[in-house]
Image (spheres, grey):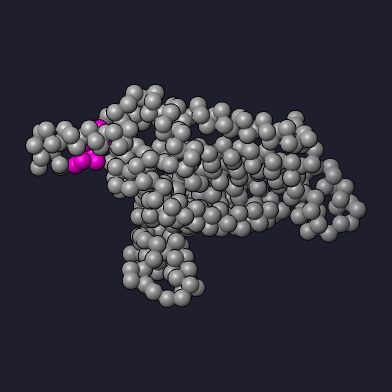
Amino acid sequence: MGKGRYLLKRLLYIIFVFFIISILMFFIYKLMPGDPVEIMLGDSKLNMKPDAYQALYDRTAEMLGVNRSLVEQYFIWIGNMLTGNFGYSTQYKQQVAQVIGTPMRNTVMLNMLAMVVVFVISIPLGIATAVRKNTAFDKTVQVVTIIGYSLPSFIIALLMIFVFAVKIPIFPISGVRSPGFSGTGIEMALDTLWHMALPVIVMSISGIGGITRYVRAAMIDVLRMDYIKTARAKGLREKVVVYVHAFRNALIPVVTIATGWVVGLFGGSIVIESVFLWPGLGKMLIDGLLQRDFAVVLTMQMFYVVLSLAGNVIMDIAYTIVDPRVRLEN
């Protein structure tokens, strides 16, 4: 009952915050300069008579719903969004729901692979550096991770492109698949992974650097605890002490940074997708901002809002998994 009550409270909290942020985002974007109707009509004004253009303008404004007051527009927009109607894209001349599917799949695919790479490398590496504290291995990893964590992602991206796409042309610079490529499902998957290699490497470098350092710091603190000394005094194998007794407690502070990093990863991929021309949500968001395509931009922003709010709940639940002393109702 306690967990059910807690989850219900968190759900109500998410709904409340979602509506507050939706109001702020909607009115901020609506107050930005630029007429979406004129942007959608393009050069039609130059090729039409004033009366015909005005009639077309009025019809388009009615179709987009911008001929109503801002309050009415908000309630229509949020009502449509909650039912899966994300509006009409002035840039793509289609419903947003029809153009968002493929970019969302590409973004999720890219971020999920980067997330797997980061956790597979950073957690064992953080444990190894903590166990070998102050050795040459530890100091070398610390220097490398600091560099990777400190460099901006777009700088790393440009370096990777220069090295692995220009000087040593191993990986492609952009795209999801090779032009005109056809083959079996496995061959197409391998071709996609080949195109994902550079973006995933760039996205992973910063995450590996940051999470490795957090895992290392948490493990060092835990390995100093009295119960670890007691476990070693009982003659338990070092692997059992490190991976069974120490690692679970070391995960408690790591859960916070890891969950926050996963949520931030989707937002950070905007830059990477723009650099590598990866057709995902990030590139769509940038294009939407440049074209004043508010329906697309608002949909993208609310996706990131929901992702962030869900991340907070996942973080709380993860605490109870790694530390049984934590209770959700508290």
Taking the image as shown, residue 319 lies to the left or right of residue 182, namely right
Q: Quadrant of residue 286?
A: top left
Foreground residue among 59 and 162? 59
* Nearer-the-camera pick, 159 or 11: 11
Q: How many labels does the image show?
A: 0
Residue at 51% x, 29% y is 19
**Vertically, is 328 above or below 247?**
above
Foreground of the two, 122 or 279: 279
Residue at the outermost right position: 234
In the image, which residues are magenta?
35-42
Q: Specify whether residue 45 is in view.
A: yes
Q: Where is residue 217 in the image (x, y as percent from the top left)?
A: 66, 44
Magenta span includes 36: yes
User: Magenta stretch containing residue 237, yes or no?
Assistant: no
Relative placement, left or right, of 273 versus 225 is left
Position of residue 110 relative to residue 218, above or below, is below
Q: Position of residue 75 (x, y in %)?
A: 43, 28
Main SS class of the magenta portion in the image? helix
Residue 292: % across, % down: 30, 38
Measured as percent of width and height from the top left, residue 132 is found at 69, 54
In the picture, residue 175 is in which quadrant? bottom left
Q: Which residue is drawn at 56% across and 46% down?
A: 262
Left or right placement of residue 281 versus residue 252 in this view: left
* Residue that appears at 30% across and 37% down: 63
Q: Does residue 228 lie above or below 10 as drawn?
A: below
